[in-house]
Amino acid sequence: MPPAGSVQLMRSLFPELARSLDASLSASLTAGNGTGTGTDSLDAWIDAETSELRLDSSAIGFGPIGDDGVRNAFTAAYGAARVVSAWAGIDVPEPEEFAEQGVNLTALGDALAADPQLTIVPAPHGLGLGTWKALFTEATERDGSPLKTYAFPDGGSAAGIVFAPEIERWFAALDQVQDQSSPAVRKFRMPHREVEWTLRLVPSGDASPKLGLPFSSGPHPSVPEILMLQLMRIVLGEAPIDTHTFTWLAGELPGATLAARHVFAGREGVVRIDCRDVAHQGPHLGARPPVG
């Protein structure tokens, strides 16, 4: 993940703005018969001018975290989450708001320092199925996105994500904070729908760290956490996770015999959320226990 506040991160977060600035600078240099690499000069100037601001931002949001690398990783992930949330017209709660609700930012920082495969994920619960579909449509349309539009045999299509019929039917039950011990920040979005935000670390290596386990092997990330993590990675230009493994997702479906699981189908270019018997423990199905 690029260092928080760097030009590389800004270019990942705002590709259209970056292209516009590059084009304007190039035109200006051409008109003035300038020489040299204008884009490099612009990037260097932005880095120099914003270095102090980056330090101030990190100190305000993640001041309790003493490790610079961890603080940078947190801030970069937060920046990506803000981009995703802006697509839905909502704001990510500030780190201080999570701390006020009982999230221990220092402990999260210590956990990330011990395991760099973890990623901090601010996740909104309660957005609804339609909003998540719209977010993946937005991500599919980004330049360089690994997501594609999937064509169903019946003639329908879905951009970037496919939900099994059982998941769609019972999505409201999965779209909630599943671990009630996790501190949550409650915010309202129009039209008066309450969204609960959690802030936890989720293992973000390509493969689930614990494989060959049944659903009872939890805890597991919630559906909103895994979807937000995938979208954050796409914003940052990183490859989706679970390209060769499946991850159990938290939440109960009616009958307690099926549970949700996640995979990225690379050939199709879609994230898939489907169901599997809770007793299944295939070699490629496992857990990503969240920390927080």
Image (spheres, grey):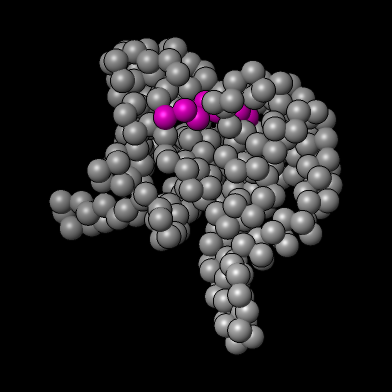
**Residue 6 locus on image (x, y percent):** 67, 50
Is 4 placed left or right of 161 in the picture?
Answer: right
In the image, residue 13 above or below residue 41: above
From the viewer's perspective, is 233 left or right of 109?
left
x then y, percent, for residue 71: 73, 35
Asked if the magenta segment contains residue 163, the reply would be: no
**Looking at the picture, does residue 225 appear above or below residue 160?**
above
Instruction: Name the residue nearer the viewer: 62 or 188.
Output: 62
- Toward the left, the furthest residue is 153
Query: Looking at the image, can residue 268 be seen?
Result: yes
Kindly tell me whether residue 184 is visible in this rendering. Answer: no
Is 201 included in the stretch rendered in magenta? Answer: yes
Q: How many marks?
A: 0
In-image side of 3 versus 255 (left or right)? right
Q: Position of residue 61 (x, y in %)?
A: 79, 41
Quarter of the image for the N terminus: give it: top right
Tell me the residue at 38%/31% (across/down): 242
Query: Residue 14, percent across and down?
Result: 58, 60
Give the quadrant of residue 168: top left
87 relative position to 255: left or right: right
Q: Which is more toward the observer, 193 or 200?
A: 200
Q: Is residue 252 above or below residue 20?
A: above
Residue in the picture at 48% in, 35% down: 226
Q: Which residue corresponds to the image point at 26% horizontal and 46% vertical from the top-left?
A: 268
Q: Nearer the viewer, residue 252 or 229?
A: 229
Q: Residue at x 16, y 54 (%)?
A: 154
Looking at the rendered image, the quarter that the C terminus falls into is: top right
Q: In the image, is residue 178 above or below residue 50?
A: above
- The residues colored magenta run 200-206
Instruction: Pick whichever, 173 or 212, lies toward us.
Output: 212
